[in-house]
Image: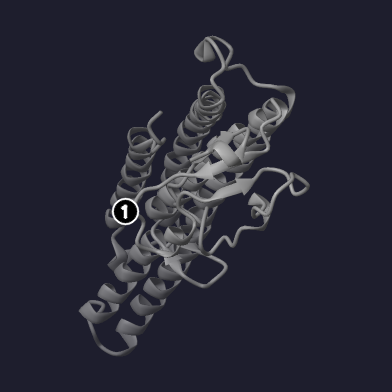
Amino acid sequence: MTDPTYERQIAALVRAYQKAIKAILGELDRLDIAYLSRANSAAALIEVTKILTELNKESAQWVSDNIPIAAREGVLTTLVSLDVKDATKVAAFNKINREMVKAAVADTQADLLAVTKNVERRVRTAVRQVTAESMRANLAKGVNGRKTISRDILDGLRKKLGDSVNSGIVDAAGRRWKPEVYVEMVTRTKLAETHREAAMNEAIGRGALYARISRHGATDACQLWEGRIIKLTPDAPGDYPYIGDLPRRQIFHPRCRHTITPIRDPANAF
């Protein structure tokens, strides 16, 4: 079987986020920053909320559709690798995989919802700050004898609005991500994890306690693990590393494309 990549599905979701971000930026660009009122900013925020609400619905449906697909393909990978007859007809979820899929759907939907909540919070904060600064600048221009707010101030306020959308996610390491880039990373990682876990659960349920890590000609730290035999349970016989102990900085890291192929007897795996 070919290794799962889910490029088309991920690209469709990323486009949805790109479209929403573009729409939000359009709403912010329409704001007349030079004469910004609280009423105008409130109206813009209502539109932003509508955009993100629709995006949440679309992303939730995407997760409900695609996480089970990844799990099913993981099960099928195991059935084919173990030479199960009529594999495509028996690729149903066992109990542990049914529970895993439910958890994966819930986790992924929560991750994506956190993205839109973060964007909405940052946009709301920026709009409020820019509104207040615009109003203060309009007060000050009379004191200074000016008729308009300076271009530098307007450019700075406009940039603050744009930055609130384009750098909407800050991870645990303090790195800033564009929302659509973060979504691509999260979904690619979750689909790969789901495929891997489903394959592993099905394998263990059928008495296969080992697997081989795929080969892709990796040039990063993953190359240290390509083609290696691993245990799927820590107490399986043999001097093989257990999948739960593998260093995540080297293999099965975020965006990692490596998969596992379950096997029954590691001695006959080559």
Residue at 54% across / 20% down in the picture? 83
Residue at 51% across / 62% down in the picture? 250
- In the current view of this chain or complex, which residue is farthest to the front? 267
Percent x, y for residue 235? 78, 47
- Element carrying mark 1: helix
Left or right: 2, with 200 as reference point: left
- In the current view of this chain or complex, which residue is farthest to the right? 235
The answer to which image quadrant residue 132 occupies is: bottom left
Which quarter shows the N terminus? top left
In front of the other: 208 or 251: 208
The answer to which image quadrant residue 232 occupies is: top right
Q: Would you say residue 43 is visible in this rendering?
A: no
Q: Would you say residue 7 is visible in this rendering?
A: yes
Within 10 Å of disc 1 (Cα), the crowding (few <14, some 14-19, many 20+) is some
Percent x, y for residue 37? 40, 61
Residue at 29% across / 90% down in the picture? 144
In front of the other: 29 or 176: 176
Q: Tell me the residue that label 1 is attached to.
A: 25
In front of the other: 186 or 265: 265
Residue type at the position of mark 1: Leu
In front of the other: 114 or 213: 213
Percent x, y for residue 247? 59, 62
Percent x, y for residue 264? 63, 32
Q: Is residue 58 above or below residue 107?
A: above
Q: Is residue 55 above or below residue 177?
A: above
